[in-house]
Image: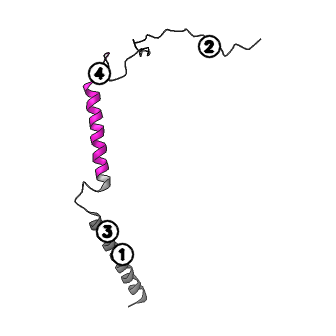
Amino acid sequence: MADDSNAIDAEIVEAETFKDGLAAPAVPEPDYSEAGEPSFDFVRDKIEKRYNTSVGATELAGLGTDHTVEDLDKKIADREQAGRDKLAEIRKQMRGE
């Protein structure tokens, strides 16, 4: 005889069906009415999410700032040159010049 200690007792429930033969959901999806219409809050949140995503993508691309790639490259080059100049000054001081 097989071990039935792991058997689960369950009840079979018939699903309601629409006229096209698809099973109807037992509970409407969150943020939707019984008729399947989205709530105002759901639509507003979806629009805000899309807007924030587009703003973030624009900022990452550098299009939302006054700085261009050339400006940023020049700032980086100036900073590196200032670092090299400071290093040269420190080396001169250490040599006693």
Which residue is pictured at 30% across the width and 16% down the height? 35
Mark 3 or mark 2, earlier in chain: 2
Does the magenta segment cover residue 48? yes
Residue 54 in the image: state x and y as whole percent. 29, 45
> What residue is pinned by disc 4?
37
Q: Nearer the viewer, mark 2 or mark 4?
A: 4
* Towards the viewer: 17 or 50: 17
Mark 1 or mark 2, earlier in chain: 2
Which amino acid, by three-letter code, is at mark 3? Asp
Q: Is residue 25 above or below residue 48?
A: above
Dot 3: element: helix
Residue 51 in the image: state x and y as whole percent. 27, 41
Which residue is pictured at 42% across the width and 85% down the height? 94
Cβ atoms under marks 4 and 3 closer than 8 Å:
no
Q: Nearer the viewer, mark 4 or mark 1?
A: 4
Q: CA distance from mark 3 to mark 2?
A: 67 Å
Q: Nearer the viewer, mark 1 or mark 2?
A: 2
Q: Is residue 64 above or below residue 6?
A: below
Provide the residue span drawn in magenta. 31-58
Q: Residues within 10 Å of mark 4 (few under 14, many from 20)?
A: few
Report the side of 1 relative to 63 (left or right).
Answer: right
Which residue is pictured at 27% across the width and 35% down the height? 47
* Towards the viewer: 85 or 11: 11
Mark drawn on residue 73: 3
